[in-house]
């Protein structure tokens, strides 16, 4: 196994067929295994080169045997890309056939055509402008033949949110994703975190009959660490209201010779209730900027 290590085991897959594993190392390679009590083990190796990687696996029926022959004669493959929730066609989707230089793009009706592929099983990487905006990608295995056009489904917002946030993906909430970069050649400060804050209104406060009732407001927040590559993800953020995103350093662990001053100045963002994702990239101004201008900017 070399330097491989065990990451997670889910035990059983829920009826939805969706599982999520978080805190994987970006850029690393993982192996996924799935099986039933009477089927052979299906294995899939994927490189985690995106913030969110959606992988589709198929466990063969015990009665299905793997063909040892693959017809390598090139032919023209066609199909369509659709939304997994509504079934609506998806335009401008990119369909890349991994292991080959071939890829295609869907038109306004969601259809695509690509030639030069061999018959048999292929791995596909599916992306759209929306998935690209949050650093997500869908990967799946397909079987190509001349009789059955492909129908590829883009992961729904709910599926993408569950894949990204797992148990933190509560009903109605959204997520903020982005990239933190340095405005100079200096590395990002150590122990850097991104914080989102918003005003919440809780249950009414009971008062005496002589005074009118009211509601108690609180300041809510969620925080997340910044990865080695500068990426961050904040889950459990409400949609449809103003969220203030800012940066903070938990501990002063900057490299020797680097002086960074971060003021508690936030950037306002709103998460669309339909999309449920917002992207906000932040840049740390270089130390040469005067102190009164050193702040996070989108």
Image (cartoon, rainbow, N blue to C red):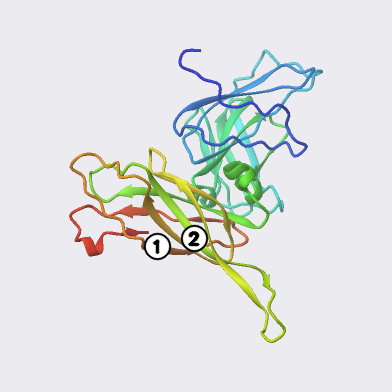
Q: Of the numbered discs in the image, which one, if any, rests on residue 196?
A: none
In depth, the one of 39 and 11 nearer the eye is 11
Which residue bears the numbered disc 1? 266
- In the image, taking residue 115 as reference, residue 37 lies left or right, namely right
Q: Report x, y in % for residue 3.
A: 46, 16
Q: Residue at x 76, y 18 (%)?
A: 39
Q: Report x, y in % for residue 271.
A: 55, 61
Disc tally is 2
Q: Quadrant of residue 72?
A: top right
Q: Can residue 154 be seen by looking at this rendering?
A: no
In depth, the one of 67 and 166 nearer the eye is 166
Q: Looking at the picture, does residue 195 appear above or below residue 167?
A: below
Q: Earlier in the sequence, mark 1 or mark 2?
A: 2
Do the residues under discs 1 and 2 have CB atoms within 8 angstroms? yes
Which residue bears the numbered disc 2? 197
Q: Report x, y in % for residue 2.
A: 47, 13
Dot 2 alpha-carbon crowd within 10 angstroms: few under 14, some 14 to 19, many 20 or more: some
Q: Quadrant of residue 201?
A: bottom right
Q: Looking at the picture, does residue 124 appear above or below residue 134?
A: above
Gap between marks 1 and 2, in whole Å? 9 Å
Q: Residue at x 47, y 47 (%)?
A: 224
SS category of the residue bearing label 2:
strand
SS category of the residue bearing label 1:
loop
Check the picture and name the quadrant holding the C terminus: bottom left
- In the image, taking residue 64 as reference, residue 169 lies left or right, namely left
Q: Report x, y in % for residue 60.
A: 74, 23
Q: Residue at x 56, y 37 (%)?
A: 22
Q: Can residue 78 be seen by looking at this rendering?
A: yes
Question: Can you name the residue that lies furthest to the bottom here?
Answer: 210
């Amino acid at each position: 196994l070399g330097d491989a290590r065990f990451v997670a085991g889910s035990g059983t897959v829920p009826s939805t067929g969706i599982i999520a594993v978080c805190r994987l190392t970006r850029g690393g390679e993982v192996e996924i295994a799935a099986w039933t009590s009477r089927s052979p083990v299906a294995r899939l190796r994927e490189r985690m080169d995106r913030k969110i990687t959606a992988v589709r696996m198929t466990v063969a029926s015990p009665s299905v045997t793997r063909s040892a022959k693959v017809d390598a004669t090139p032919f023209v493959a066609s199909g369509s890309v659709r939304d997994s929730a509504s079934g609506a066609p998806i335009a401008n989707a990119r369909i890349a056939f991994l292991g080959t230089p071939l890829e295609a793009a869907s038109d306004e009706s969601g259809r695509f055509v690509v030639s030069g592929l061999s018959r048999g099983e292929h791995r596909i990487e599916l992306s759209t402008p929306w998935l690209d905006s949050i650093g997500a990608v869908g990967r799946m295995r397909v079987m190509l033949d001349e009789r059955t056009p492909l129908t590829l489904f883009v992961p729904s917002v709910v599926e993408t949110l569950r894949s990204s946030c797992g148990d933190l993906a509560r009903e109605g909430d959204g997520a903020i994703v982005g990239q933190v970069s340095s405005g100079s050649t200096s590395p990002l400060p150590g122990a850097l975190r991104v914080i989102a804050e918003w005003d919440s209104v809780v249950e009414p406060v009971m008062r005496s009959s002589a005074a009118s009732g009211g509601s108690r407001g609180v300041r809510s927040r969620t925080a997340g660490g910044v990865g080695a590559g500068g990426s961050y993800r904040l889950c459990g953020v409400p949609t449809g209201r103003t969220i203030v995103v800012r940066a903070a350093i938990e501990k002063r662990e900057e490299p020797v010779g680097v002086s960074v001053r971060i003021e508690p100045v936030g950037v306002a963002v709103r998460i669309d209730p339909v999309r449920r994702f917002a992207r906000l990239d932040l840049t740390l101004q270089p130390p040469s900027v005067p102190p009164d201008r050193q702040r996070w900017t989108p």
